[in-house]
Amino acid sequence: MKVREIEQYVRKFWEEHQVYRVQNHDAKPKCYVLDMFPYPSGAGLHVGHPLGYIASDIFARFRRLQGYNVLHPMGYDSFGLPAEQYAIQTGQHPAITTRNNIATFRRQLDQLGFSYDWSREIRTSDPSFYRWTQWFFIRLFESWYNRKTNRAEPISELIRQFELNGNQQVDAWCGKVPLFTAADWKRYSEKQKSDILLQYRLAYLDEAWVNWCPALGTVLANDEVKDGRSERGGHPVERRRMKQWMLRITAYADRLLEGLKDVQWPESVCEAQRNWIGRSRGCTLRFPLANPAAASDMQLREIEVFTTRPDTVFGATFLVVAPEYPALQSLTPPDFADAVQQYVAYAAGRSERDRMADVHSVTGQFTGAYVRHPFTHALLPVYVSEYVLAGYGTGALMGVPGHDQRDHRFARAFHLPIVSIIEGRDVQEAAYEEREGTLTQSDFLNGLSVSEAIEAAIAEAERRGLGEERIQYRLRDAVFGRQRYWGEPIPIYYDGQGIPHALADDDLPLILPDIDAYLPTAEGEPPLARATDWKYKGKYEYEKTTMPGWAGSSWYYLRFADPHNDQAFASPEAICYWGAIDLYIGGDEHATGHLIYFRFWTHFLHDLGLLPFREPALRLVNQGKIQGRSCLIYRLDDGRLLSARRRSEPEFQNLHTVQLHVPVSLCDGDVVDVAGLRQWRPEWAEATFLTEPDGTFRCTHLVEKMSKSKFNVVNPDDIVAQYGADCFRLYEMFLGPLEQDKPWDTKGIDGCYRFLRKLWRLVAGDDDRPNLSDEIPSDAELRIVHRLIRKVTHDIEQLSLNTAVSAFMIAVNELTELRCNKRSVLEPLLICLSPFAPHVCEYLWQHTGHHQSIVLEQWPAWDDRYLKEETFDYPVAINGRTRFKVTLALDLPEERIAEEVLAEEGLRRYLEGRTPKKVIVVKGRMINVVV
RNA sequence: GCCCUGGUGGUGGAACUGGUAGACACGCAGGACUUAAAAUCCUGUGGCCCGAAAGGGCCGUGCGGGUUCAACUCCCGCCUGGGGCACCA
């Protein structure tokens, strides 16, 4: 068996016969199997990448054999930060880096034998692709969300309504807009109209809080900020409000929540999305200022808070507003202005992440203002504190220290009163947050349960005009603009008055212009501001920010249906034929990013009538991560290197040592190649290696993330070169359940290699000349192969691929034992195995007299007739402990089984004179005798 | 703090709706073949104990309880690894 020759031969055969080409029209049922496409990083693939790809490939091949027309494509998420960083450092255009990286990925993917239809490959950074990403953005820009019909509708319809009736009849998911009449609308200037419409558009411009780094001239992500400074360079970062393009995803919050019922996704992902959306019901409450005349702005009359626990309103002893609360300055009396100003400045210097991570310290400042409790009219002080988030609710809350732990901590720190409003609950030490108990000290709520009190409080607040019921979401609208170069240009230009306009569809794609350097300008403008002569119709400024990484990935799955279409993102026929993804495989780190955005875009496109379905992926499976298995050795302070097993020897026990990572490639199990180490690190060329008594030098292991710096990255190329792609595929699947994280250890791969050789010998014999017999197989042989077919069919359906592989091993072991060389047994075996080990199976198929590819064969069916057993070895347990076995006919009725067992000679010695009380018989399973 | 996961031999893991715990593989030990090695094949392999052996006993799925004729599986309470979210009012 010459693995490399076989695999090359087979790949050439597939290529010549174009066996993976897929047509968009077929009488067969369709099946769409997709991997989350990769970002083509410079590092290439490591063994973790292919795990999901192999699983989806097995599934796709399985469905193809079952007679489905299968769409199984691959592409690249090729816009992204790393290529841009590299460009900044080297000046090389990201397009070039990206092209090279893709070539590497392609080469690595090719040698693994995937059944992708490469004619459908896509790249999100390709203008022919991002033209449509821009096209979708324009659709978002030209849409608003109608809450009456509960769907997105064209903005032109909205304008017509404004012209007829103003906005009073309109129920939209929108920003803050004053009511206006048709007459008002007609009077408004173009600029005013544009500003109002932006409040309705699903793609809109608005102020958003960002981490601005003046020194770098750019906006940073939360994880690029450490302790208020930029991770790169350590420059100060401040929270600043900036105009940004945003997407109104919040309009879809409820539909995104409900849609989860219609998909077969892991519960953990659904749960993460529910939490991310964070729907909660409560009400707003207005607290009038006690002395408006004292405030800096005497127009200010009240502070509105949002609460999910209106039942606790009588436990409120103070109010807190966010440092970014818009009316903060207005409500602060002049003599507190300085103190408040100082506190706000302090909070602005703390990143969102800092503020959220620091749970222990409690900070805040009294504003000097007081409000009246809406029901009791008691005076409550108003504080400002960073634990209140500006972006959630109204940016102000009522402090109920008795029943909210955060409020409790704050009250303790500022010596504010803590009262209990739940009967029999002492809250001085800790807040009582459970929603159980009976209300007390609460006026009209006394005697009610928490849930009754919530309803009663909302009703009463509404009756008295103090507040309204409100559904609040944690989900925020998505910031869509990036101060980066390597992304899709946003297809917007600004006219002379600064009014944003979308490009006409015919003007797309708006090509990403070349620039001289990939950095922001000196004025802090995004890199695109460097582009010269880049103007709409030669005179209007284009938008300078680009789209985020998730733009292209939000719809790419649709493009695979019709990747070369230049009239539409895909033809309606292609979209209708392929529909939603039947099986989507990828990492669970995308649970609240990609997976929520691509659902959002899909719902939106459904509203436009572009898609016949609402949910993009029917079934989702998260493959686990493959962890690295690092190898560590010890270094003594004098520079000598110590073999791991000797660490605990008395001589070394108390010495200080450092653990050092050494390359996994230099370790065989825990035996380290010392000569290799000397070469790897020149400073160790002459070092002393303290070896074991047997002369070996050993390492210890640690399971951790696979990364270059830990020297534990295993590259699939090396493994494939040694064992072949089939063996690699089998082994990755054999390693354990697909969904589970697991450490990579090359050691076990020999088992899969041996299995393939056994298979080879079984089919091709020792002399490599397949000579299958047409004899009628024995019952035993038939049972083996039919049991295998049943098991594997079930397992692939469940994606339990590790157990499927072991089923193959068992079958091959048993057939080898029987020296079976019968065609009618081995051919179904080859077909079943071909999704796992496509090269070897194809090769053997060709060499056992077939001219057509095994890919085009039919999945075998099992016949229960061959699986019937006449008798069963019943395990007999005495009081639950298995003692011996009895062979009995399977069709024996239960009473007869009990009789047989009681008559059994072997039973007597376990009874020790006792009489059996009861005999439990589970037919075909086991027998339990109770004494 | 909250949510999601996992904890089974030396290792990766298997066990259907509660019904023979440790399938399959790695590793290890012993043996066969060989001048030798590789490759291949065979045997053994959860722990402790009794026995020369055949065979047998006890304990065992993170810990402690419970339900059941029967628990890796179900219930209650803990411990612990991994991941995610996070002052979300």
Image: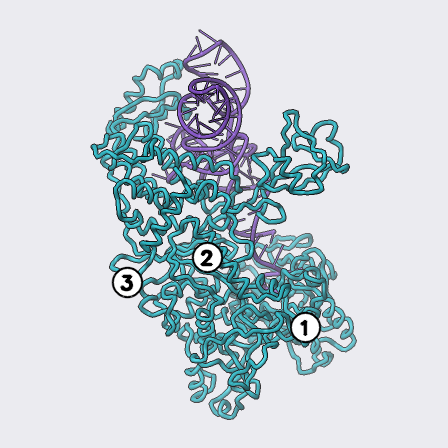
Earlier sequence position, callout 3 versus callout 2: 3
Q: Residue at 60%, 77% (x, y): give it.
A: A529
Crowdedness near tag 1: few (<14), some (14–19) or many (≥20) residues, C-alpha within 10 Å? many
Reading the image, the residue beneath label 3 is A25
For residue A578, side relative to residue A391 (left or right) = left
**Chain A shade:** cyan
Q: Is A597 situated left or right of A796 in this image?
A: right
In the image, what residue type sits under mark 2?
Met
* Residue identifier under label 2: A36
Subunit of label 1: A
Mark 3 and mark 1 lie on one chain; the one further toward the N terminus is 3
Image location of residue A266, percent across then percent down? 45, 52
Q: Where is B67 relative to A219, above or below?
A: above
Amino acid bearing label 1: Val
Name the kind of residue labelled 3 in the image: His
Determine if residue A660 is in view: yes
2 or 1: tag closer to the N-terminus: 2
Would you place residue A571 above or below residue A104 in this image? below
Residue that appears at 55% across and 57% down: A42
- Chain in purple, by letter, is B
Report the Cα–Cα distance between label 3 and label 2: 24 Å
Q: Which mark is residue A371?
A: 1
Say the numbered circle drawn on residue A582: none
**Residue A258 occupies quadrant:** bottom left
| Relative depth, front residue between A331 and A20 | A20
Q: Where is residue A647 in the image (x, y as percent from the top left)?
A: 69, 31
Q: Residues within 10 Å of mark 3 (few under 14, many from 20)?
A: few
Q: SS of the residue at dot 2?
A: loop
